[in-house]
Amino acid sequence: MQSRSKSQSARVTKSKGTQSFGGIVVLAIGVGLGFVASLAYQGIESGESDRLGAGIMTLFTSTNKRPTHSEDSANEAEAASPERATFDFYTVLPEIEQLLPAQQGVETQVTPSAKGTPEKPPAQEKEPSSQSHYMLQAGSFREADAADHLRAQLTLAGYRPIKQQVTIQGQGQFYRVRIGPFIDMAQMEAANRRLTAMGIKTLRLKVSRR
């Protein structure tokens, strides 16, 4: 009976010793992990390359700074947009009008008065063969009826006038009346003298084709 009690007491003592040792091991591991984590945190905060944790900080920094494929595509699109805009500009505006120096001015309303009718108006080419030609603008009006009146007057005088509707930024809509095209300045000047005799002030234009 006594020997049995001694045996049970020995087993209980051994079990308690094993549990105590296991607790000490777990505690030591926890302390070690905490120490390592503390060193890593200090290394990240300090920014020094030779300390523990600096490599982790460098990895995250390089990852954040790396440009994505979508950003590269957007930059390429922005760089290419000016060329596309320039191309569209020359496609939409194939003709450039140049106001000749002798008749500089802005859009004005002209009230024509019939002082005379030219006996024979100068010839007008339907399709000039050169890359540029000349036009005479006989008037520019805000009302379409006024432009039609001048157009009818020029038609009776033997010309083939053209009515052109345009919108000018900051001024609104205008109706231009032009005659031409003329192949050279001599023909244009002859027509201009006759229109002046009719009381019509003109603008002389040179139109270049691209």
Image (cartoon, rainbow, N blue to C red):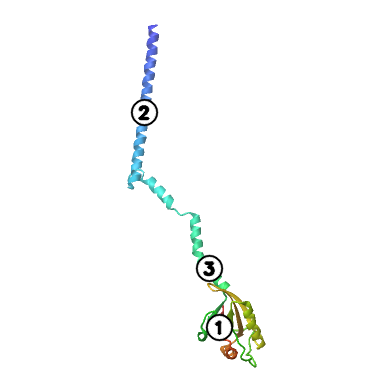
Q: Position of residue 7 (x, y in %)?
A: 39, 12
- Residue under circle 3? 85
On residue 25, which mark appears? 2
Q: Which amino acid does the dot numbered 1 rest on? A: Leu
On residue 205, which mark appears? 1
Which is more toward the observer, 3 or 115? 115
**Mark 3 / mark 2, whichever is N-terminal:** 2
Tell which residue pokes out farthest to the top in this image.
1
Occupied quadrant, residue 97: bottom right
Q: From the image, which quarter does the N terminus lie in? A: top left
Q: Tell me the mark number nearer the camera, choosing from 3 and 2.
A: 3
Q: Residue at x 39, y 19 (%)?
A: 15
Q: Residue at x 40, y 13 (%)?
A: 8
Q: Which amino acid does the dot numbered 3 rest on? A: Ala
Q: Callout 1: few (<14), some (14-19), or many (20+) C-alpha neighbours within 10 Å?
A: many
**Mark 1 / mark 3, whichever is N-terminal:** 3
Q: Is residue 52 left or right of residue 201?
A: left
Which is more toward the observer, 154 or 42? 154
The CA span between labels 2 and 1 is 100 Å
Please say if 72 is above or below 21: below
Element at label 2: helix
Occupied quadrant, residue 11: top left
Which is more toward the observer, 133 or 51? 133
Q: Position of residue 144 (x, y in %)?
A: 63, 77
Element at label 1: strand
Q: Callout 2: few (<14), some (14-19), or many (20+) C-alpha neighbours within 10 Å?
A: few
The CA span between labels 1 and 3 is 27 Å
The answer to whether marks 3 and 2 mark residues whose Cβ atoms lie closer than 8 Å is no
